[in-house]
Amino acid sequence: MTDTLNCWNIADLAGQARARLPRGVWEYLERGVEDETGMSRNRQAFDRIAFRPRVLRNVDKIDLSTTILGKPSALPFAIGPTGAAGMMWYRGDLALANAATKAGIPFSISSASTLNVEEFAEIDGRRWFQLYMWQDRELSYNVVRSAHATGCDTLLVTLDLPVPPNREYLQRNGFGMPFQLNRHNIPDILSHPRWLTGVIGRYLLDGGLPQQANLPKGLKSSIVRGSKPGAIFKQSDLDWDGVKKLRDIWPGNFVLKGVLHPDDARLAMEMGADGVIVSNHGARSLDHSIAAIDALPDIVAAVGGRMSVLLDSGIRRGSDIVKALALGADGTLIGRATLYGLSAAGERGVARAIELLQNEVSTTMAMLGLSSIDEIDGSALA
């Protein structure tokens, strides 16, 4: 295995991403909320889980293919929805989607993307669409219909941001919405010329700064302007009846993201969801929330195999993915890991992140005496 990026794990990609990005963009990617206890809690929860390997099991060939939400996937993970990819790399969402397609895994389009869902229509790979509800509910329903019309087979409804999270650093560094230049970020931006010319410069040459794309033309605004009335994400009044209306509109796989309580998983199953994503939003919503991997076993037990259970939040190694599968997850979503790759080197960096995780999953399975994803279960854990 060779690597022209000289990155041999996800942490290496993170280091290159940090060097290339201005502080504000890096902090948006990397940091959590309030006192930021959640990221270390996610990591510590994975680290507490130990393996109990078997030997002499003939692991000469390792099959990483599996089924995620009823369709085949070359690997047991998908790229999760990330709304600011377009600020990390020029048209970054397409770089993520192309790398996922070449790897044979699903890619999630965020409703907060700077590219609209129609721009992904020509990508041959499997596409999911993630939704935050807008204040004007009809906008949400219309973009959901557009997502299905352009070939998305799965709708992910993110539930763990009923109100905007308290990311204080974004107010300090000016990289909130709207983006604001200040005496702190101007020198920092100018000291990162590769990002300034390669991202902002290309957008300006291409017609202007990026916008929140999945909105009608009259409601779109650039990153330096606040959201127009009616175009604000608002989920504080969302309840099970509101989610049921989305279920009725959406004909494909319907998945609720941000579930940490087994009772909510049961309710999701009762209202017709096809799956849940056990997630604490990468420790970016509620500080002191339970780690997603700690919440996983109770949710797996609650649904009893009657719906799909995926996991995200905190994954940095292929061994983390194997641990989630051993605890009953049907697959995982990757967020920051592929964004590190994107920020470091665009599509090539995303491909490297996927390759690293793929190789680590394969190595971990071989060390455990497992040759296929179907063989991974609780017996692999100590």
Image (cartoon, grey):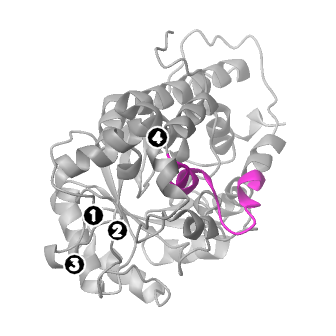
Residue named by callout 1 = 211
| Residue range (magenta) | 22-41
Give the spatial CA distance, label 4 vs label 2: 19 Å
Tell which tag, 3 or 4, sits nearer the viewer: 4
Identify the mark nearer the N-term, 4 or 2. 4
User: Label 3: which residue?
Assistant: 219
Amino acid type of the residue that numbered disc 4 sits on in the rendered structure: His
Q: Name the amino acid, label 2.
A: Val
- Type of the residue with mark 1: Gln
Looking at marks 3 and 4 on the same chain, the residue that comes earlier in the sequence is marked by 4
x and y, in percent, of residue 135 in the image:
35, 86
The numbered dot on residue 363 is none
The answer to whether any part of residue 79 appears in the image is no
Dominant secondary structure of the residues highlighted in magenta in the image:
helix
- Between circles 1 and 2, the one closer to the viewer is 2
**Residue 252 in view in this figure:** yes
Residue at image position (67%, 57%) is 292
Q: Is residue 113 positioned above or below 180 on the image? A: above
Dot 4 crowding, Cα within 10 Å, few <14, some 14–19, many 20+: some
The label number, if any, that marks residue 192 in the structure image: 4
- Of the two numbered discs 3 and 2 on the same chain, state the one appearing first in sequence: 3
Residue 158, percent from left and from top: 47, 69
**Marks 4 and 2 in Cβ contact (< 8 Å):** no
- Front position in the image: 31 or 67: 31
**Image point 63% across, 32% down: which residue?**
11
Query: In the image, which disc is placed on residue 224?
Result: 2
Is residue 40 inside the magenta stretch?
yes
SS at circle 1: loop
Q: Are marks 4 and 1 in contact (CB under 8 Å)?
A: no
